[in-house]
Image: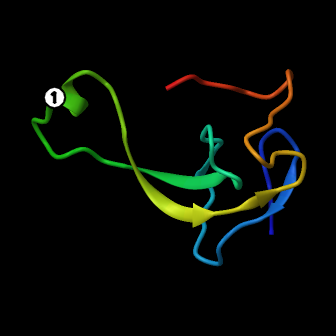
């Protein structure tokens, strides 16, 4: 079980960690849980201040299902 920074409650995989990110992908029924990982030293991604993510798994966040999110959610477009 988890509580997001936005105060949503949900179910996440047992190996989820604090700091993992809930990602709503267009066309996917359940939100995805991502974990930020370090880019290899010297990589273009690291030089440009971008991040690599790895998929932790699917999750259930009450109020965020079927690719739907509300206007007061912290949203980033990738």
What percent of the width, then of the height, locates residue 77?
56, 22
What percent of the width, then of the height, locates residue 35?
49, 54
Residue 47 as seen in the image, left or right of residue 27:
left
Residue, far left = 42
Colour style of the rendered protein structure: rainbow
Residue at the image position 90 percent from the left and 46 percent from the top = 63
Residue, far front = 27
Residue, far bottom = 14
Residue at the image position 60 percent from the left and 67 percent from the top = 16
Q: Is residue 6 above or below residue 56?
A: above
Instruction: Give the residue pinned by disc 1.
Output: 44
The answer to which quarter of the image holds residue 1 is: bottom right
The answer to which quarter of the image holds residue 58 is: bottom right
What percent of the width, then of the height, locates residue 5?
77, 42
Q: Is residue 22 above or below residue 78?
A: below
What percent of the width, then of the height, locates residue 40?
17, 46
Q: Is residue 15 above or below residue 35?
A: below
Residue at the image position 86 percent from the left and 29 percent from the top = 70
Residue at the image position 73 percent from the left and 41 percent from the top = 67
Residue 57 as seen in the image, left or right of residue 67:
left
| Mark 1 crowd level (few <14, some 14–19, many ≥20, 10 Å Cα) | few
| Towards the viewer: 5 or 67 | 67
Q: Is residue 1 above or below residue 67?
A: below
Q: What secondary structure is found at the residue carrying circle 1?
A: helix
> How many callouts does the rendering have?
1
| Towards the viewer: 74 or 59 | 59
């Amino acid at each position: 079980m988890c509580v997001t920074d936005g105060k949503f409650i949900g179910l996440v995989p047992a190996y989820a960690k604090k700091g993992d990110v809930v990602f709503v992908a267009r066309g996917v029924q359940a939100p995805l849980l991502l974990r930020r990982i370090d880019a290899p030293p010297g990589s273009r991604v690291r030089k440009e201040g971008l991040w690599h993510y790895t998929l932790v798994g699917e999750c259930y966040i009450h109020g965020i299902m079927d690719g739907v999110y509300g206007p007061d959610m912290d949203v980033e477009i990738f």
